[in-house]
Image (cartoon, rainbow, N blue to C red):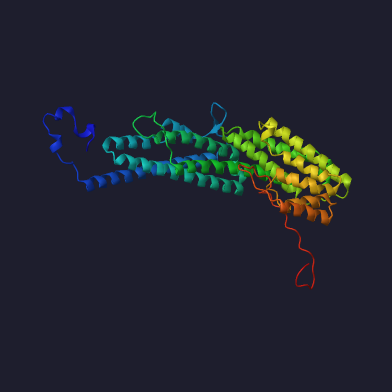
Amino acid sequence: FLSADMMTHPSLLPEVDVAALGPLFAADTVDYLEETYVIKVQASIAEWMQKTLEMEVKEWFSETEPEADYQGCFQTTLPIIAMKVRTFQMLDENIRVASLISDTLLPKVRSMALAELEAFLGSLTEALVEFDREHQREPAASKCYAPYLLSAINNCLALSSSISALCTEGPSPSEPSRIPSSLNAAVEKAQKKACRLLLDAMLEDLQPLFAQLPSRRWLSDPQMMGNICEVIDTHVKGFCRAHKPFSTYLLSDSEHLVMSQYVKALLQKKIVCRNAEERNQMGRRMLQDASQLKELFCSLGLEESDQSLRVIADLQELISLKDPTMLELEVPGFVTKYPDISDDHVSMLLEVRGDVPKEIRNNVLEIMAQNPQVLPENHQSVFSNILVPAPEPPFCLGKPKCA
């Protein structure tokens, strides 16, 4: 071995001609010893991480909320352990030992350590999925479901900082850290899963309310939107217990989710306007809803310029337009503004109006076909993920093919 701590003590130099000495062990013996060391350390680390995860999962089913840090954001014991022992002191110490013994052993231990961290994060993601299943089966068993999902997001941020310390290459900690892309992906996957579950929980509470829209009761009852805003406010205010940037992501994604659910409900054709007065009434209700939702999300911290809810006000213009022949001019402009809208979306919107002749509808769709839209780079989709009901097939009896 070439380590100064092992074989080149100054007091030995006058007595020993180091250059004349061969290696202490044969190369294959060194390889065997290094592999054995790595395997044993790996087994020890894997067992330690498994116990850590089991403790974490057990805490998720507590009847009390997780503790908050100095910023008011939820956290569990996992990041506390990570910060106290610098992301598993066992990993750090073994990497230091490896660097003292051999230059060839160090990359092996480092690679093993990062692989175990990646596996741990994968197990964390799977545990989040199982946590959601258990919550769906028995909600009372996980009374603090949302707070612990928020703590999982914050935990991953804390782990990322500690992983960066382990990934530092070279003798100086001031040198840049490089985290393997697969490890970064594992961290992001766990965070995104927790975010998705939080938004799914919000959607679950909103769907029964959106199922009542649109309706003739909705046309004259502003309290229906008030009820929706109360649910949104409750969920989104909880999102601030996640550290940035995830609190911002959750706020933005929740606004986009609300917009999508509103437009989807509108295009279900649960109500078809019977006359001009109903079209005007629907347009007014949509404007009031859009304004109420806009003000709510502004109060929650999302700038109006970052909101997608303006599509509701734009849609109402097409609904309340007095002369249906003007749709041939107005719809192409709308399509230019929202290039991901499809023929099916437009067809359903025209049906909701209740007064569009077949000829005008065909002309509008023909204009769309002649002017296909190209989605600009970084376009935020509005209609792409909104499904509309399949059109009812024409009635035909005793004919091989419907006209």
x, y (%) of residue 382?
A: 68, 44
Find residue 172 and report its image quarter.
top left
x, y (%) of residue 258?
A: 69, 41
Position of the N terminus by quadrant:
top left
x, y (%) of residue 129?
A: 55, 47
Asked if one can make out residue 225 in the rendered structure from this viewpoint, the answer is yes
- Count the marks: 0
Find residue 120 and report its image quarter.
top left
Asked if one can make out residue 213 in the rendered structure from this viewpoint, the answer is no
Find residue 284 and report its image quarter.
top right
Classify residue 210 as left or right of residue 173.
right
Q: Nearer the viewer, residue 78 or 256?
A: 256
Q: Nearer the viewer, residue 302 or 58?
A: 302
x, y (%) of residue 291?
A: 76, 35
Position of the C terminus by quadrant:
bottom right
Looking at this view, name the residue that lies furthest to the top: 70
The residue lying at 63 percent from left, 40 percent from top is: 253
The residue lying at 65 percent from left, 42 percent from top is: 202
The residue lying at 30 percent from left, 36 percent from top is: 99
